[in-house]
Amino acid sequence: MLNTISTMLGGFIAAVAEYIAVATQSSPRVTAYPWSSASGFGSKYSDPATLPPGAGYGVTFNAAGTSIISTNGGTPFLVGYPWSSAGFGTKYADPSPALTQGAQSAFNPAGTVIAMSSDFSPYIYAYAFSSGFGSKFANPATLPTSVGSSAAFNPAGTVIAVSQGSSPFISTYPWSSGFGTRFSNPATLPTGYAGGVSFDSTGSTIGIAHDVSPWMSLYPWSSGFGTKYANPATLPGGPGSGIDFNPAGDTVAISHNASPYVAAYPWSAGFGTKYANPATLPTGNGNGISFSVSGTTVAIAHSTTPFLSVYPWSAGFGTKYADPATLPSSTAYQVAFA
């Protein structure tokens, strides 16, 4: 994704535009703002002309920052728009064939595939993408076993993972213009209903957030699962919902459903000592978490107003940014930067 970074162009420093978007339970179901790590939220963008038709469960941008996808609880479940500094463009044509209930989606790194987890069989969908939805890829030969919660590609775009609601709680597949043969389960499974899933920036670690202690499970990854890493000395405070690594790959953070609602740890092939909680906590259950691509900001989507809490990040949480002038409308489930 594009982010607030400084790029040297012919001897001049050029600021790259940055945005933050959040998926919410009630209308407009997807909300976006300009974002600056120096000043925080800009004025809310106008809502898209054609709103998502149901509760917003997920939001993601493509890597180029030219498209934004909303996953939601109403047909067609997967809604996309062109994106620019002007905000939302005209809604893309719906994907065909249609899906069966949306959860959360993910682009591959090239932006040529959009995958979405689903509450109903086949639990994972994937479509070609190029300024709109293309043909659906064939379902994997071995489907996930139950409700799909979240999807993620590894940084190379050669593996796709889907977290799910029942054992083994995670399914992973090789990806090359379609699903390959499902990888074997990890020897030590996650312990409960899995929410978020994420690879680190090197693709050498996969993390799953779940709703039974220890609330998250991390594994080495190299064409399959390695031996589960030892749990951190201080566990997160409750059921895990979202998980993300910072771009440098030296921090892992989890949103969870009990105070302090977020936990972050140094990461280097294992957990370091948990970072101190932010001075101003999120106000309710943490549903989703995302680092900006520069790694200088971390955002948590949560269940209670102001529904979104954003902090500077530099080896720990900085002072919470001021809330946007126009808040998200309701419970926020996922947050994304572009």
Image (spheres, rainbow, N blue to C red):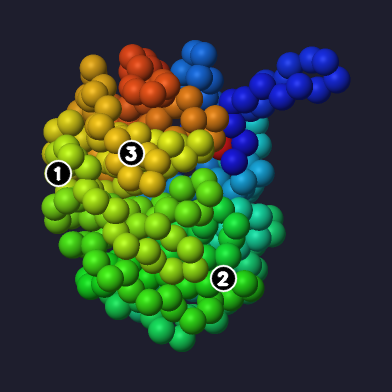
Check the image and report above or below for 178 versus 247.
below
Task: Report the front residue among 249 and 309.
Answer: 249
Check the image and report above or below for 315 versus 150.
above
Q: Are marks 3 and 1 in contact (CB under 8 Å)?
A: no
Is residue 118 in view?
no
Q: Determine the residue positioned at 59% across, 26% down.
A: 4
Q: Position of residue 208 (x, y in %)?
A: 32, 55
Q: Determine the residue positioned at 62% across, 25% down.
A: 5
Q: Earlier in the sequence, mark 3 or mark 1?
A: 1
The amino acid marked with disc number 1 is Gly
Check the image and report above or below for 22 versus 76.
above
Distance of label 3 from label 2 (alpha carbons): 26 Å
The amino acid marked with disc number 2 is Trp
Residue at the disc numbered 1: 238
Which labelled disc corresponds to residue 253?
3
Residue at the disc numbered 2: 175
Distance of label 3 from label 1 (alpha carbons): 13 Å
| Residue furthest to the right | 10
